[in-house]
Image (cartoon, rainbow, N blue to C red):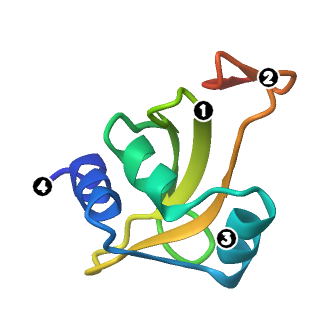
Amino acid sequence: MKPLEKIRRQLAQGQFDFTRHALRRAVERNIPESEIRQMAENARIIEDYPQDKYTPSCLLLGFTKSGRPLHMQVSYADSELARIITLYEPDPNEWIEFEKRR
């Protein structure tokens, strides 16, 4: 199974955990688990970090049912759970169509 397919499945099924940083950010930014599951349905990789410090990871872009864009950095190490490293709503002043850095 390709990394994106596996990550999407894990996120959609609630098979994920958070780093301490990501959990704090989810609370601060009011990103509930339901929105994580929703964005997983259409998420795509916009940046790949195969040489990341601890484990390979990628930056996903996905949209909630209400159209809220979310970025989520996720480890794609071979694991039962997807590990969310950070998540946020991208700033349109910093991103072109939420996909490319300005």
Instruction: Pick whichever, 86 or 58, lies toward us.
Output: 86
Q: Residue at x 71, y 57 (%)?
A: 30
Counting residues from the N terminus, which is met first, the one under dot 4 or under dot 1?
4
Q: CA distance from mark 4 to mark 2?
A: 33 Å
| Residue bearing the label numbered 1 | 68
Amino acid on which the number 2 mark rests in the picture: Pro
The mark lying in front, picked from 3 and 1, is 1
Secondary structure type for disc 3: helix
Query: What is the quadrant of the N terminus in the image?
Result: bottom left
Query: Mark 4–mark 3 contact, CB under 8 Å?
Result: no
How far across and how far down the image is residue 29, in percent? 77, 56
Residue 79 seen in this snapshot: yes
Q: Residue at x 60, y 32 (%)?
A: 68
The mark lying in front, picked from 4 and 2, is 2
Instruction: Pick whichever, 41 or 32, lies toward us.
Output: 32
Amino acid on which the number 4 mark rests in the picture: Met
| Residue bearing the label numbered 2 | 92
Q: CA distance from mark 3 to mark 1?
A: 18 Å
Counting residues from the N terminus, which is met first, the one under dot 4 or under dot 3?
4
Counting residues from the N terminus, which is met first, the one under dot 4 or under dot 2?
4
